[in-house]
Amino acid sequence: MTAQTTTDVFKEVTVMSIGWAIVMIVLGFLALFLPFTMGISLSVLLSWIILFGGIAHLAYAFAARDALPFLWRILIGIVYVAGGGYLAFHPELALESLTLVVAAIFFVEGVLEVVAFLPFRALSGSGWMLFDGVTSLLLAFLIWHRWPSSSMWAIGILVGINLIVSGFTRIMHSVAARDALKVAAG
């Protein structure tokens, strides 16, 4: 077996990165074409994570040395198990709740971006901060105004767009790294 050079390892990593980027792009397009399915899938996954987190809290309770920490951990575990279990078996409700939280996050982000723009408005390029803030506010309004029916599309489309953009970004970084390696190798 021969020792791999740094160049060989770098080439393998670049190829793997491009491969994963393509997977991300394909999953992103699937999410765009099946937004409700993606939203429900994410809701179910999140619900089960909460449920298993509750089980971990319950198990951790037995490590407590005193009654008060034991009781506290048991109560937290019960809340997690009950909430996660309920949402796991009611994925539409989980998706509606998740969608409303996303709308609230976009609203707060939009307000903060617009406020942050104000002291920098005289600087070149600061208009992008305002654009980001206004876009976030518009998304928040679109999701909230149509809620709960926006739950059918919002999470899936947002995750899909994110996966596509991340995939293309990863490809561009990998190609640039590969090109830099070719230039460095001579």
Image (spheres, rainbow, N blue to C red):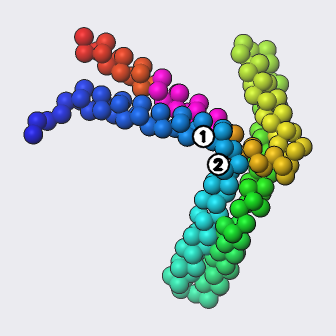
* Few, some or many residues within 10 Å of mark 2 (<14, 14–19, 20+): many
Q: Position of residue 58 (x, y in %)?
A: 58, 79
Q: Which residue is mark 2?
A: 38
Task: Decide if residue 165 is on the left or right side of residue 180.
Answer: right
* Few, some or many residues within 10 Å of mark 1 (<14, 14–19, 20+): some
Q: CA distance from mark 1 to mark 2?
A: 8 Å
Q: Residue at x 26, y 33 (%)?
A: 9
Q: Which residue is mark 1?
A: 30
| Residue nearer the viewer, 143 or 60 | 143
Tell me the tag on residue 48.
none
In this view, 16 is above or below 96: above
Please tell me whether mark 1 sits on a helix, a strand or a loop: helix
- State yes or no: discs 1 and 2 in contact (Cβ < 8 Å): yes
Q: Which amino acid type is marked by label 2?
A: Met
In this view, 1 is above or below 127: below
Q: Which amino acid type is marked by label 1?
A: Leu
| Residue nearer the viewer, 125 or 106 | 106
Residue at the far left in the pictured view: 1
Q: Position of residue 161 (x, y in %)?
A: 64, 35
